[in-house]
Image (spheres, helix red, strand yellow):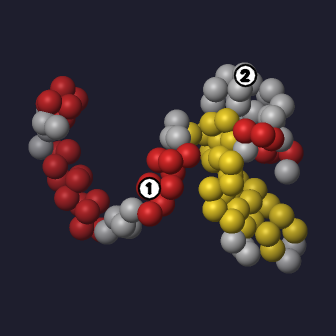
Amino acid sequence: MKMVSYCPLCENRYNFMEARVLEDSGAGSVIYLRCQHCRSAILALLLQGHGGVSSVGVVTDLQPEEVLKFEAAADLTDDDILANYQYLQKIDTVLELVGSR
């Protein structure tokens, strides 16, 4: 639990009032934490098993609502990834990519 008790970027202790449980099941929880000091956000996965509790966290720029939106989205298929790869191979510059939206 030490990993989610302080910000890994600025090492400021979290105010747990800023922790938001995004999902909670029998197997574990997904928790969104935002540091008031440096404004960074951590998405933490807490897993409960027979051996105890383990956690994995990742720094994110997503808002809690975006995390839930992407979780509900359809999974990417191999064909989706291949189509995007082939599309990116045709683009010469980043400006061309941005301009194509």
* 2 or 1: tag closer to the N-terminus: 2
Closer to us: 36 or 82? 36
- Residue at left offset 48%, top offset 60%: 71
Q: Is residue 96 shown left or right of residue 9? A: left
Q: Quadrant of residue 95?
A: top left
Q: Is residue 82 shown left or right of residue 21? A: left
x and y percent of residue 66 in the render?
Answer: 47, 47
Q: Quadrant of residue 2?
A: top right
Q: Is residue 99 shown left or right of residue 67? A: left
- Residue at left offset 36%, top offset 67%: 74
Looking at the rendered image, the quarter that the C terminus falls into is: top left
- Toward the top, the furthest residue is 37
Which residue is under mark 2?
A: 37
Determine crowd level at label 1: few under 14, some 14-19, many 20+ residues with C-alpha closer than 10 A. few
x and y percent of residue 33 in the render?
Answer: 69, 41
Q: Secondary structure at mark 2?
A: loop
Q: Is residue 57 visible?
A: no
x and y percent of residue 32 in the render?
Answer: 65, 47
Quote the CA–CA distance across marks 2 and 1: 27 Å
- Above/below status of 54 relative to 62: below
x and y percent of residue 94 in the render?
Answer: 22, 29
Q: Is residue 5 visible?
A: yes
- Toward the front, the furthest residue is 17
Which residue is under mark 1?
A: 70
- Residue at left offset 31%, top offset 69%: 77
Closer to us: 26 or 44? 26
Q: Secondary structure at mark 1?
A: helix
Question: For the residue marked with disc 2, what is the amino acid?
Answer: His
Question: For the residue marked with disc 1, what is the amino acid?
Answer: Phe
